Amino acid sequence: MNDKDTTRIYIVIPAFEPDEKLIDVVNEIKQQLDCSVIVVNDGSGKSFDKIFESCKDKAEVISYENNGGKGHALKTAFKAIKEKGGSCVIVTADADGQHKTPDIVRVAKAAKENPGKLIMGCRHFTGKIPLRSRFGNSVTKKVYSFAAGVKVSDTQTGLRGFDSSMLDFMCGISGERYEYEMNVLLECPKEGIDFFEVPIDTVYIGGNESSHFNPLKDSIRIYKDILKFSCSSLLSFFVDYILYTVFILITKNLNMSNILARVISSCFNFTMNRRFVFRHKDKLLPAAIKYFTLAAFILAANTVLLNLLVDNVIHNEFISKIIVEALLFMISWVVQRSVVFKNRKRTVKTDG
């Protein structure tokens, strides 16, 4: 950082049962960067007191008795920084030495130069990478890209930075353990917060045995919005299908029944998706116009496909209806996520 730069920098290091590497991490950071280091002792127990005591001459150590999880530790530090007041830059780093100090410095610099953005220290995953880490990142980044509509090259990095304007947002994210970091990535696009990627070295210690990536749990966390969308769509489908059945029994008119049922179920679906799935916060009218334009397109496609199936393939109105709805489901998800309920412009920028 520039010697004349007066922006205060906090380096937050959550630590649970750390070894001597934590002391080396703190010492090296203080040697290379003019900053305040906050180490959070996440209920490590008395047998680790000596390590934390060795850090106190160069870092502020926040301790509590019971293990709360990484998310809890990070938010504890963020709240302490918020109470100190003033503008600053916050960088989170791991306690095991897997984040090199020059990379921490570069992330801090990027956070200062890009206020209001989440800075991601992203690894390249080249060379000899533990299979678990390569697989974990590959799976989560693809699923995340589909769910959030934003590409991120390293979803599991713990080296992140942001400025104090984002403290309220970071403190308000749900999750007390390792899910917190993924929840941050999922919430940023919804709030219109951009990502800025800083390439960093890939360092693994002991085959990355300390990794807490769980393919099943992490994938479920990423998929939660798709699951909510699916539930909303399923409820809307039940409304649509029941009305469709009632209207067709009354009118004996396939097209009229399909259109009337879709108009009513679309109003229900719009309300559900806006409030509970995408939590859209911008003005109602523009979103409604985009949604019902999409609904009109889906309805037209639905009607054409339904008639084609009934007249030429299956010859059953009820089975055909189910098949057509399934085909149009994913189109509706992608367009609603990316166009209809997008709060603000979302981008990922890269340093270098």
Image (cartoon, grey):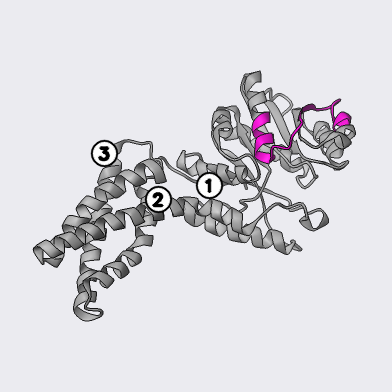
Tell me where residue 47 sits by quadrant. Answer: top right
Q: Position of residue 86 (x, y in %)?
A: 62, 19
Closer to the chain start, of discs 1 and 3, is: 3
Whether residue 207 sits left or right of residue 310 in the image: it is right
Which residue corresponds to mark 3?
Answer: 285
Tell me where residue 310 sits by quadrant. Answer: bottom left
Inter-mark Cα distance, 1 to 3: 28 Å
Label for residue 230? none
The kind of secondary structure element at disc 3 is helix
Closer to the chain start, of discs 1 and 2, is: 2
Q: Is residue 282 visible?
A: yes
Are the residues at dot 1 and dot 3 in contact (C-beta closer than 8 Å)?
A: no
Q: Position of residue 348 (x, y in %)?
A: 53, 47
Q: Position of residue 6 (x, y in %)?
A: 68, 22
**Three-letter amino acid code at the position of disc 3:** Leu
Q: Is residue 149 visible?
A: no
Q: Position of residue 243 (x, y in %)?
A: 20, 57
Tell whether position 267 is magenta. no
Taking the view exactly as shown, the residue that stands out farthest to the left is 251
**What's the magenta region?**
52-77
Residue 125 versus residue 20: which sits nearer the camera?
A: 20
Which residue corresponds to mark 2?
Answer: 337
Say which residue appears at 25% left-offset and 60% top-offset: 241
Whether residue 99 sits left or right of residue 347 in the image: it is right
**Three-letter amino acid code at the position of disc 2:** Arg
Position of residue 103 relative to residue 243, above or below, is: above
Whether residue 100 sits left or right of residue 199 in the image: it is right
The kind of secondary structure element at disc 1 is strand
Inter-mark Cα distance, 3 to 2: 17 Å
Say which residue appears at 86% left-offset and 36% top-offset: 48
Which residue corresponds to mark 1?
Answer: 348
